[in-house]
């Protein structure tokens, strides 16, 4: 068991499943569930947690942590597979912890 390194990880929108421009409900899916998913939409973690570290009119920070129950090199933050994380490597039993910062521009 090891802690997964997210230093080089990339968070991006999976353009094969989402139409642009995105709606606000698509953005909010990033905080829909504590679970992480594979390309088939199956959960790949055990004992996940997700919590809001800070929430202001211009930025929200979400902490995700838990243990992987599968191995892989990519994952999705939502069951619809819109929010894709690549450039990582993890094995079953590895622990993870990362923060997603969402910055908001416009009306508050």
Image: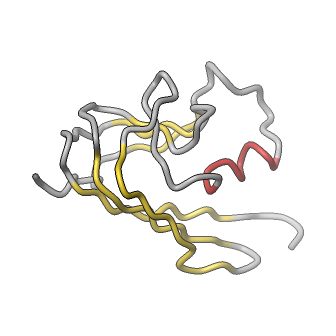
Q: Nearer the viewer, residue 37 or 85?
A: 37
Q: Nearer the viewer, residue 41 or 73?
A: 41
- Of all residues shown, which one is farthest toward the left? 1
Q: Could you say where residue 102 lies in the image, as x and y percent from the top left?
A: 61, 62
**In the rendered image, the vertical position of residue 8 relative to residue 31, given as above or below:** above
Toward the right, the furthest residue is: 107
For the point 22% across and 41% down, which residue is it? 90
> Taking 19 as reference, is 7 left or right?
left
Q: How is the image coloured?
A: secondary structure
Q: Position of residue 7 (x, y in %)?
A: 27, 55
Tell me: 92 left or right of 50: left
Q: Is residue 24 above or below residue 99?
A: above
Q: Quadrant of residue 2?
A: bottom left
Instruction: Report x, y in % for residue 40.
Output: 48, 22
* Quadrant for the C terminus in the image: bottom right
Image coordinates of residue 83 in percent, x first then y, are 56, 40
The residue at the point 70 percent across, 27 percent down is 18
Q: Quadrant of residue 78?
A: top right
Give the farthest residue toward the front. 47
Lateral position of residue 44 relative to residue 50, left or right: left
Viewer-side residue, 43 vs 30: 43
Residue at 62% x, 25% y is: 15
């Amino acid at each position: 068991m090891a802690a997964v390194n997210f230093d080089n990880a990339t968070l991006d929108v999976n353009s094969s499943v989402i139409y642009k421009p995105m709606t606000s409900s698509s953005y909010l899916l990033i905080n829909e569930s504590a679970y992480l998913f594979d390309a088939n939409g199956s959960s790949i973690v055990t004992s996940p947690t997700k919590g809001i570290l800070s929430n202001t009119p211009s930025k929200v920070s979400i902490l995700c942590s838990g243990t992987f129950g599968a191995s892989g090199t990519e994952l999705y933050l939502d069951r619809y597979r819109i929010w894709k994380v690549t450039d990582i490597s993890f094995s079953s039993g590895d622990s993870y912890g990362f923060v997603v910062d969402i910055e908001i521009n416009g009306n508050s």
